[in-house]
Image (cartoon, grey):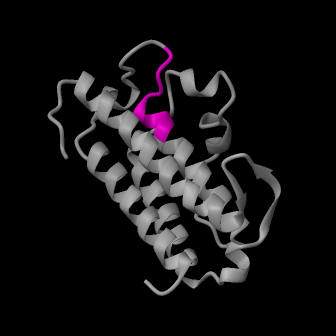
Amino acid sequence: METAGEGIAYAATAARQMIDLYTSDLKGGDWLHRPWPKANCAAWIVGHLVLASRRALMHLGATDLPPLPDGFDKRFARDEAAPGASDFGDASVLVPLFDKHHDLLADVLRRTSSDTLNKPLENPNPRFGTVGEFAGYMALHAAMHAGQITLIRRSLGRPPLV
């Protein structure tokens, strides 16, 4: 890898592959299963990750983003009501939408200059202060949520995959 953007792109791609693997055998009600009350379900997790990838893409200056279904941003918001909802619509659209956003994120990162990656965020976070740190955090964020999906899988009686 020659650039920091390529390294972050690799991490984003690896995180996408984890989400794809861990959701590959979820069907119907599996998407709404919560291993304990108030835990995230896989549907909310993947929808939330779509929105997180979109935010990273916007910070990187991407403008031609994949369209979202109507009401998607509200359905997968981080407010108190959304993660606990019992209906997230057609779950079959979630992984393809996540893949499109995360693949676009990796492609944009591979082409992003060090100057852009080092640009300070207008509203820094204690976990990241630059565009590049934010993009890198998105890969960690997706991997963390992939871990939640492994718990969902195990509570459904599925075997470990890794």
Q: How far across and down, in percent of the image, does residue 101 sit?
A: 52, 62
Residue most extreme to the front: 126
Horizontal arrangement in the rendering, residue 154 relative to residue 31 (left or right): left
Q: Nearer the viewer, residue 154 or 134?
A: 134
When the figure is inspected, residue 153 is found, relative to residue 69, above or below; the finding is: above
Q: Residue at x 49, y 57 (%)?
A: 139
User: Does 96 sit above or below residue 127?
Assistant: below
Quadrant of the image occupied by residue 138: bottom right
Screen quadrant of the N terminus: bottom left
The span picked out in magenta is 38-45
Q: Residue furthest left?
A: 159
Instruction: Tell me residue 81's x, y (percent).
Output: 65, 21
The x, y position of residue 82, in whole percent, is 61, 27
Is 154 colored magenta in this rendering? no
Whether residue 155 sits left or right of residue 81 in the image: it is: left
Inspect the magenta stretch and tell me whether residue 43 lies in it.
yes
| Image point (72%, 77%), residue name | 116
Q: Is residue 89 visible?
A: no
Q: Residue at 49% across / 52% down in the picture?
A: 140
Asked whether 29 or 19 is in front, the reply is 19
